[in-house]
Image (cartoon, helix red, strand yellow):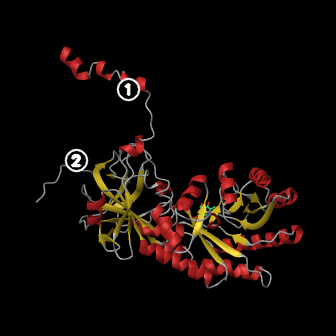
């Protein structure tokens, strides 16, 4: 029998599962997971190390098909755009494009990435508040769908039109009140204040741009289908006002992204299956309102720019418990080899945590810290766990959205990422980093290297010897 390490005894209140008004929170469920899509966790870690991002192709395909079916069976002109910022691993973007999504990018870097993946300009939606002149001009030349964020971008586009001696087709981004708060009012032109109409007038007056679409992204993890109904109703009404008064023709209504995944926002007690509308309910609300609001025979393109709903549940992060300790107040704490450097969204979401093995004993309210040597690096607070030993793997999910792209290279290397294909093959889609990833762009002035100086400094042990 393995000898147990001695630990000073403490008296702790036992929890069998904290209750809330809806019953027991599933955050406290004690689950074991030994595989992901049929591949043993042990094998994944043996081959690719820990921590490890693991993506399920099966999940992506299923979510993509579900969304496409929900919308295209209800409306005849649907275009899906994959929101790069949610997860721009090349393999993930390529998979989304394989499934029929065009690219939705919000920066010059993302635009370049889409082009490098072979996506032609006209299959790229270019959004975002910072489109440098060089990127804008390239997007214009390549025929991208450009949604203007502010008036300075209108002026830039007019300059480009002048230079190229062409008229440029653009959409404008709107922000509006559809009951979602806080309103994302820093992006685009406000509808209710008349700012959006002013922008249309300015575009008309400039005679260099042709307004052909409306864009609006109301936020992320939207839990009410009715918010999209209000959004669509307002966008269509505004589109007709623009068409009737200014002679532009609205070829597309781009409603952005925002559909939730089956994740749990902190502070929401109900399990996602109960708290969130299904994709069919979202599609019904959006297309139903569209069909009601559009004039007979009008079927502008309905563009979706989904991110989270397509990828979040496909992503898992395998971590390893590297230490266990008791805090001064008696709380059981674990140190894992991944923290907020890899799970940035831990600040807002309460992930499922599964163990790779059955562990006996009683549950104790515990906290899981990462390796960052920073007080804010905690990825699970108040999670009920049995006594875990070093080496236990914890699988965090769903983590496919906004974690990889927002991961930090702070005192640690970023780990490998793998994709489990439909047929169960494990494909490496990003290698683990090493020191060269951190240093290869650094330059050290020669004067600091040549006469480094440290060899002339006495070391502490010399001092001690002299004493
Ligand atoms: C303009 C735009 N479109 C699409 C998305 C994707 O949103 P989500 O991941 O919530 O679907 C975002 C994310 O913030 C966005 O800013």
Residue lying furthest top in this view?
467
Label 1 element class: helix
Classify 10 Å Cα crowding around label 2: few (below 14), some (14-19), many (20 and above): few
Q: Quadrant of residue 300?
A: bottom right
- On the image, the x and y values in percent for residue 438 come to 41, 43
Q: State the residue position of label 1.
A: 449
Q: Is residue 176 left or right of residue 271?
A: right
Q: Quadrant of the N terminus?
A: bottom left
Label 2 element class: loop
**Depicted 10 relative to depicted 71: above or below:** above
Q: Nearer the viewer, residue 68 or 464?
A: 68
Q: Is residue 156 left or right of residue 364?
A: right
Q: Nearer the viewer, residue 31 or 162?
A: 162
Q: Quadrant of residue 42?
A: bottom left
Compute the Cα span from label 1 to label 2.
49 Å
Q: State the residue position of label 2.
A: 8
Q: Quadrant of the C terminus?
A: top left
* Rendered residue at 67%/72% (across/down): 228
- On the image, the x and y values in percent for residue 392 come to 27, 59
Q: Which of pointers 1 and 2 lies earlier in the amino acid sequence?
A: 2
Tell us which disc is closer to us: 1 or 2: 1
């Amino acid at each position: 029998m393995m000898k147990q390490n001695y630990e000073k005894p403490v008296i702790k209140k036992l929890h069998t599962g904290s209750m809330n008004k809806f019953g027991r929170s599933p955050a406290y469920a004690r689950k074991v997971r030994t595989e992901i899509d049929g591949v043993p966790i042990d094998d994944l870690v043996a081959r690719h190390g820990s921590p490890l991002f693991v993506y399920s192709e099966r999940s992506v395909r299923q979510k993509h098909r579900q969304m496409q079916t929900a919308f295209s069976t209800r409306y005849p002109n649907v275009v899906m755009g994959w929101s790069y910022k949610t997860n721009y691993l090349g393999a993930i973007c390529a998979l989304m494009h394989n499934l029929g999504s065009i690219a939705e990018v919000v920066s010059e870097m993302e635009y370049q990435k889409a082009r490098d993946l072979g996506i032609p300009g006209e299959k790229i939606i270019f959004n975002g508040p910072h489109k440098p002149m060089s990127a804008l001009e390239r997007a214009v030349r390549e025929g991208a769908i450009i949604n203007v964020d502010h008036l300075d971008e209108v002026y830039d586009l007019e300059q480009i039109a002048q230079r190229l001696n062409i008229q440029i087709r653009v959409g404008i981004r709107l922000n509006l009140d559809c009951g979602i708060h806080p309103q994302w009012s820093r992006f685009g032109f406000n509808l209710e204040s008349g700012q959006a109409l002013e922008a249309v007038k300015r575009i008309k007056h400039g005679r260099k741009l042709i307004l052909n679409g409306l864009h609006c992204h109301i936020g992320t993890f939207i839990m009410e289908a009715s918010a999209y109904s209000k959004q669509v109703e307002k966008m269509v009404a505004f589109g007709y006002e623009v068409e009737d008064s200014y002679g532009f023709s609205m070829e597309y209504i781009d409603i952005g992204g925002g559909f939730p995944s089956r994740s749990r926002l902190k502070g929401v007690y109900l399990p996602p299956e109960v708290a969130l509308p299904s994709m069919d309910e979202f599609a019904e609300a959006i297309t139903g309102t569209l069909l009601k609001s559009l004039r007979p025979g009008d079927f502008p393109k309905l563009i979706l720019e989904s991110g989270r709903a397509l990828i979040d549940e496909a992503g898992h992060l395998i971590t390893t418990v590297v230490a266990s300790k008791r805090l001064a107040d008696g709380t059981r704490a674990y140190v894992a080899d991944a923290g907020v450097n890899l799970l940035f969204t831990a600040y807002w979401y309460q992930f499922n945590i599964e163990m790779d093995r059955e562990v006996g004993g009683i549950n104790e309210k515990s906290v899981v810290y990462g390796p960052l040597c920073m007080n804010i690096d905690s990825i699970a607070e108040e999670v009920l766990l049995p006594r875990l030993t070093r080496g236990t793997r914890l699988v965090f999910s769903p983590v496919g959205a906004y974690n990889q792209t927002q991961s930090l290279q702070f005192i640690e290397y970023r780990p490998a990422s793998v994709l489990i294909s439909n047929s169960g093959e494990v494909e490496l889609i990003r290698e683990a980093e090493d020191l060269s990833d951190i240093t290869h762009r650094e330059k050290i002035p020669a004067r600091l290297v040549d006469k480094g100086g440290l060899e002339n400094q006495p070391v502490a042990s010399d001092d001690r010897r002299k004493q």
